[in-house]
Amino acid sequence: MTEHTTNAEPSPTPTQRVQASLARQGMMRAWGVQLARADLGSCELHMPFSDAVSQQQGSFHGGAMGALADIAGGYAALTMAPPECEVMTAEYKINFLAAKSGGTLHATGTVVRAGKRLLVATAEVVHVADNGERTVCALMQQTLVPVPKQY
């Protein structure tokens, strides 16, 4: 009997794949965004409140909420894209439901459909207050496109 060996690298786990991509995003690093979990077809990110993500009235800025939702849905889609690809958002629609300050935003992205050319995901953004109270702040739906990985 001959032993078969291979030098092929094992495929990265969803967590490894998302963490490697997230580490390359300067804006997310600057805003303190952390990966909470990544599974096949889903991803959860956390963003603490800070001046960097606030608006003039003292709550989380809608642009920061939208970016966090976009990234959570995008990374959920990344876990289902071919290994040689990243994903880019083609469009998203977001509903802002509540303005909150302090605490942390938790964005959970979920893939609705993973096709060859397009992926569709949703994301829910929940504010978690320092006392643990949870409030849904935003809901998003997006369309993503797999693109060749450039790094």
Image (cartoon, grey):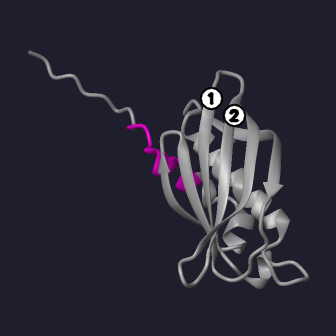
User: Quadrant of the rendered structure where residue 111 is?
Assistant: top right
Amino acid type shown at disc 1? Arg
Count residues near mark 1 (Cα–Cα under 10 Å), then give few for <14, some for 14-19, many for 20+. some
Q: Quadrant of the N terminus?
A: top left
Q: What's the residue at 57%, 84% (across, down)?
A: 130
Task: Examine the rendered structure and indicate whether residue 116 appears above or below residue 56.
Answer: above
Can residue 149 be seen in this snapshot? no
Location of residue 35 in the rendering, given as x and y in whole percent from the top left corner:
54, 62
Query: Given the current orientation, which residue lies at the most extreme right position?
Result: 56
Which mark sits nearer the N-terminus, 1 or 2?
1
Q: Residue at x 77, y 68 (%)?
A: 98
CA gap, disc 1 and disc 2: 5 Å
Q: Main secondary structure of the magenta part?
A: helix
Question: Mark 2 falls on what kind of element?
Answer: strand
Q: How many marks?
A: 2
Residue at point 67% right, 50% down? 123
Stretch of the chain drawn in magenta: 10-20
* Mark 2: amino acid: Val
The residue where tag 2 is placed is 120
As helix, strand or loop, the secondary structure at mark 1 comes to strand
Q: Position of residue 79 (x, y in %)?
A: 54, 40
Q: Nearer the viewer, residue 16 or 63?
A: 63
**Vertical placement of 134 versus 151: above or below?**
below
Vertical position of residue 137 compared to residue 112: above or below: below
For residue 2, what is the image quadrant? top left
The residue at which mark 1 appears reads as: 113
Is 13 included in the stretch rendered in magenta? yes
Left or right: residue 85 versus residue 132 is: right
Q: Residue at x 79, y 79 (%)?
A: 52
Residue 50's label in the rendered image is: none
